[in-house]
Amino acid sequence: MEKLIINNDILFSKVVELLREGKTVTIPVKGVSMLPFIKGERDSVELESLCGAGAGRSVSRGDIVLFRYAGRYILHRVLDPSGEKIVIRGDGVPEGCEYPSREEVFGRVKRIIKKGERPVDPYTGGRMAVWRIWELMRPLRRYMLALYRRLVWPGFCR
């Protein structure tokens, strides 16, 4: 299967346009910032709208959202939706957060498509419990992710 490489600004402007129309959009994931729950270059995500015609809900703690921050489109998890700015961090990011406004959050992951074939609901009780444990282990995350990349997912960094 051939890959089509599209400029991120062009791709995400169309994704946001579709989300504003209330449509769901499936996009491939790149990068390592959502490890170990979403694997770049392997998994895809189905997004539902949080803006425009499809905005039927607000964000909650634990939601994985598509947002724009510092000129980039990012897919990370909501830590605290209660303030003026939403606090967001990637599962594979040991430190640091993003603070987008609500207007900069466009979509919520409805499903993760593992290996291009198996849809997974990331918000089941068991998956959210694992994420909460992962969140508590943040001081050890850097070391755990290093082991994960070497043992569980060899060849990723090649």
Image (cartoon, helix red, strand yellow):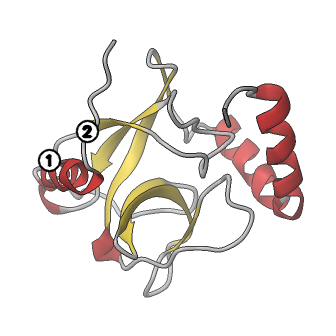
Q: Mark 1 and mark 2: span between their CA atoms?
A: 7 Å
Give the percent coordinates (x, y) of residue 64.
Answer: 49, 52
Quadrant housing residue 138: bottom right
**Residue 70 left/right relative to 87:** left
Do the numbered discs 1 and 2 sit on residues whose CB atoms are within 8 Å?
A: yes
Residue at 37%, 66% (x, y): give it: 72
State the residue lying farthest toward the bottom: 84
Q: Residue at x 57, y 38 (%)?
A: 38
Instruction: Give the number of marks.
Output: 2
95 relative to 12, above or below: below
Percent across and percent down for residue 142 are 82, 56
Q: Nearer the viewer, residue 78 or 3?
A: 3
Q: Amino acid at mark 2?
A: Val
Q: Pinpoint residue 54: horizontal percent, then vertical percent.
A: 18, 52
Question: For mark 1, does the 10 Å Cα neighbourhood hold few (<14), some (14 to 19), or many (20 or more) residues?
Answer: some
Residue in the picture at 60% in, 52% down: 33
Query: For numbered disc 2, what is the local secondary structure?
Result: strand
Q: Quadrant of the C terminus?
A: top right
Quarter of the image that includes the N terminus: top left
Q: Nearer the viewer, residue 41 or 68?
A: 41
Of residues 8 and 59, the one nearer the viewer is 8
Disc ID at residue 8: none
Q: Tell me the kind of residue under disc 1.
A: Leu
Residue ID at (65%, 53%) = 91
Q: Residue 96's x, y, as percent?
A: 66, 74
Residue 115's place in the image compared with 55, above or below, is above
Which one is earlier in the sequence, the residue at label 1 or at label 2? Answer: 1
Is label 1 in a helix, a strand or a loop?
Answer: helix
Would you name the residue on which mark 1 appears? 18
The 10 Å Cα crowd at callout 2, few under 14, some 14 to 19, many 20 or more, is some
Residue under label 2, please give it: 25
